[in-house]
Every structure is written in structure tokens, then in C-alpha cells.
Image: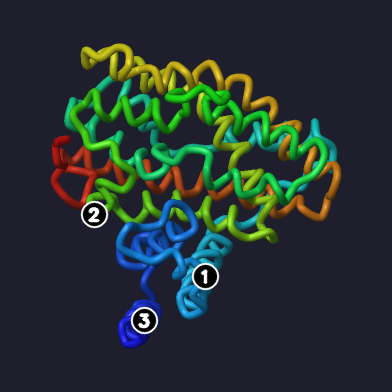
Amino acid sequence: MPDDLDQLGETAAEAFRVDTDILFNEDLQLTLFVLYELHYSGFDSIDDGWEWHPPLLALRKRLEERFENRLNDTIGELPQPAPTAQSVAEALFDMTKAATGPSVSSFVARNATLEQAREFLVHKSIYQLKEADPHTWAIPRLTGRAKSALVEIQADEYGGGVPGQTHAELFARTMQGLGLENDFGSYIDAIPAITLASVNVISLFGLHRRHRGAACGHLAIYEMTSSIPNAKYARGFRRLGFSSPVTDYFDEHVEADAVHEQIAGRDLAGGLIEADPRLMNDVFFGAATVILLDTLAGQWQMNAWQSDRSSLRAELRAAA
């Protein structure tokens, strides 16, 4: 095992030496994803003791530094509103209006074929099948108004305590309805690096206390940009002939996130900055990463579909 770890570290170092863009490097994003998953459900073939194995943490740190530097270099200047809940929420809403990425949701609503709709679900599955978990890491790191807001949002994400109604379970039924495997990570070999990056960044924020503000900003924008796209996704799947339970996941988010966006913008992100203005940059950095990575992931999918090719790295398997 030590030899394997040394080889893994050398492979990562070589990737850095050739100036690989970590956002689009399959090996580096997959490695980071696997290292993060040790802190979630883990792997049947890996002893739980490896979660805190120092050499693995050291490798993760090197990957994270490269990842953060790439994001910082790209995102640039961040909003600096007055440190009040209302001003912060308004600045976040302005960010969502300024986003100009390709609309995957409009494509799914109007044009996507059945196979493209299945690919869309596979891209989303790497987060949606564990929805809420990465942001939940921030709960013990918050206090007061922001903590209460995050707990309220997450309680809805977990189905309000009703078995079978967590959003991850609703999404699993959507995948099942389209003949896809719905175990978490089933399509990991098919998912491109940029999609993994958009999920890895939430774990990066969630697992580091210094990024508690970024975790809140990320979730705030996530909720603020969810309701309208999910309504379009629901229309797209109905256009393709599906109804409940396939559309339940999207219908639930249209309703829930219309409420969540207000709580997330004012009480979570705004309340956090109002209580501690030093977290201003971190909150808006987290928000900006959503817009950046969703734009890049959306461009990846749309470029593929408009060129009549798959947006995945491997052929889809049907559910057993």
C-alpha cells in the first residue's frame, strides 16, 4: 500500500508539472472525488480507518490547493455590498441575473431526446443522489440566524423526516423511471471531470471550517437558481411522456426552492455576513463558484448535444 500511495502522489505531481487544467482533468477530479467520499459513505472495499490516513490527507491537500487556485484565478472580483442581510440577498440575486451560461433546462424542456434526458440525469446523479449532505457539514460551524436557516433548508431536503421522501430518494425514483441504475456512483466512469468538479467544490467547502461562508454562499445561489430550471425540467420529462414518480423530484423543487431562495439569501448568507462581515468574500466566493462551474458544465453538455454526440465519457448502462 505505501508503494501505491507513492505512485499515486507521483502521478498527481506529474499532472501538475504538465500544467493540466484541474477543472477538466479526469484523473485529478476523480481522485479528489474518491478522497472526499471517504468522509461520506465510504467504499465497501476500503477500511474506514483510511478516512484520516495522513498520506491521503496530504495528497488531498495538494489537489485542493490546485483546485482553489484555479477557481480564484478565474472568478476575479467579488461583490462588496453593505453587510446587512437585505443588501447581501440583493447582491446574490443580482449575481443570478447576470449569469449568462447556456440553459440546459430550456434545452431539456424543448428539445432533448430521451437519450439526452437520460444523460442529463446521470450528470445530476453524482450530487443529487446524496443531495444536501455536503452542505450539512456547515451546520455545526454556524450559530444564530444562519444556523437556523440552514437547518430549516436541510430539513426539507431530507424530506421533513418522512422515510422515502428525501430529495435523494425522489431523484433515485426519477432515474429508475428512465431505466437507469440509481445507486450512488453507478455511473462514475461516465461522468466528465467538469461535472465532478461542480460536486467536489461543495465537499471542499463543507469539509473545511475556513470555508463555512463559501458553503453558505454556494447553497444560497444553488437555491436561488433552482425553482425555474426545475419547472423546465419537469416540462421536458412530461414532453417525453413521463409523469409521477419521474417528475416528482422536479415538481418538489419548484415549490420548495421558491421558499428556500428567500431563506438562503437573507437568513443564511445575509444573516451570516450581518453577524460576521469578515466572511463577506468567502460567502460570495462560494456563490461565484456555482455560476462558474455550472456554466462550464452546461457548456460541456450543450456542445456535445449540439454536435450530436454524447456528453458522457462512456455508454450508459441500463438498470439491472
Label of residue 304 in the image: none
Pointers 2 and 1 in contact (C-beta within 8 Å): no
Please, what is the three-letter code of the amino acid marked with disc 3? Answer: Leu
In the depicted structure, whether residue 12 falls above or below residue 39? below
In the depicted structure, whether residue 105 falls above or below residue 181? above
- Closer to the chain start, of discs 1 and 3, is 3
| Circle 2 SS class | loop
| Residue 199 vs residue 209, the one in the foreground | 209
Q: In this view, does 34 lie to the left or right of 188?
A: right
**Residue position marked by numbered label 1 in the rendering:** 52
| Circle 1 SS class | helix
Residue 10 on image: x %, y %: 35, 85
In the depicted structure, whether residue 29 falls above or below residue 235? below
Q: Which of marks 3 and 2 is in front?
A: 3
Residue 275 on image: x %, y %: 86, 44
User: Which residue does the image show at 44% across and 41% down from the upper left?
Assistant: 130
Q: In which quarter of the image is the C terminus?
A: top left
Residue 92 on image: x %, y %: 67, 36
Residue 278 on image: x %, y %: 81, 55
**Residue position marked by numbered label 3 in the rendering:** 5
Q: Disc 2 to disc 1, how far (Cα)? A: 25 Å
Q: In this view, does 185 lie to the left or right of 136?
A: left
- Closer to the chain start, of discs 2 and 1, is 1
| Residue 172 vs residue 309, the one in the foreground | 172
**Residue position marked by numbered label 2 in the rendering:** 189
Please, what is the three-letter code of the amino acid marked with disc 2? Answer: Asp
* Quadrant of the rendered image containing residue 117: top left
| Circle 3 SS class | helix
Pointers 3 and 2 in contact (C-beta within 8 Å): no
